[in-house]
Amino acid sequence: MGDFIETSNTKTAVRELAAPIADVATFAGVIQDVIDTNPFGCVGYMQGGVNYDGVEKNRESYTARINYEDLEAKTVGSISAKAPSVAAFAAVAADLLADTDLATAMGGDAVRAFDRESYSCQLKCHDANGEIYYVTFGRDSVRITSYEDDAIRTTVETWADTVPALA
């Protein structure tokens, strides 16, 4: 029986943010800026006869959190809803806040728990050197995965240093 032979050495690096990204609009703005301006210098490529942009969303999810508070502002219940896009996230949160039957069943008034919400978006990036790597943005961190060339980390880190929300 043959042995597994290492063929590459991929790396992961993470930046823990000093403070969570304030809101979904700021988060979405950071993501859209990367897609629009391509600060990592990524290049388009063809794979399996399909053309791909140098930077594109690979996956994303957004979780809204609603607390239900009684007359003394004590939390008596909560609900979380995971959505596949910023638009769906906003719609779900608005629908939950407006659902009076649900609020009655929970025994309190619906209140957004912004500090308990989460956002995640993974970008697939194709470096000019041919590597495909991922940059995953969360509310509390930014993670670079599946890269080999340290210049990729340096490029992403240098860019992140210029983005106030990623301090």
Image: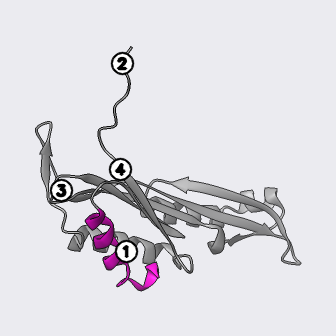
Disc 2 versus disc 1: distance between alpha carbons?
Answer: 46 Å
Of the image marks 3 and 4, the number of the one nearer the N terminus = 4
**Residue at position x 65%, y 64% from top?**
65
Residue sitting nearer the eye, 132 or 4: 4
**Residue at position x 32%, y 78% from top?**
158
Of the image marks 3 and 2, the number of the one nearer the N terminus = 2
Q: Nearer the viewer, mark 2 or mark 4?
A: 2
Under circle 4, the secondary element is loop
Disc 3 versus disc 4: distance between alpha carbons?
Answer: 22 Å
Q: Is residue 60 magenta?
A: no
Disc 1 versus disc 3: distance between alpha carbons?
Answer: 18 Å
Q: Which residues are magenta?
A: 150-167
Of the image marks 1 and 3, the number of the one nearer the N terminus = 1
Q: Residues within 10 Å of mark 4 (few under 14, many from 20)?
A: few
Residue type at mark 1 is Val
Q: Nearer the viewer, mark 4 or mark 1?
A: 4
Disc 4 versus disc 1: distance between alpha carbons?
Answer: 25 Å
Indicate the position of residue 102 as horizontal and vertical percent values.
Answer: 73, 57
The dot on residue 53 is: 3
Looking at the image, do the residues carrying marks 3 and 2 touch, with CB atoms under 8 Å apart? no
Indicate the position of residue 61 as horizontal and vertical percent values.
Answer: 48, 56
- Taking the image as shown, residue 125 lies to the left or right of residue 13, namely left
Q: Return the residue at label 4.
A: 10
Under circle 2, the secondary element is loop
Disc 3 versus disc 2: distance between alpha carbons?
Answer: 38 Å
Of the image marks 2 and 4, the number of the one nearer the N terminus = 2
**Residue at position x 77%, y 66% from top?**
68
Residue type at mark 2 is Gly
Looking at the image, do the residues carrying marks 2 and 4 touch, with CB atoms under 8 Å apart? no
Q: Return the residue at label 2.
A: 2
Q: Return the residue at label 1.
A: 30
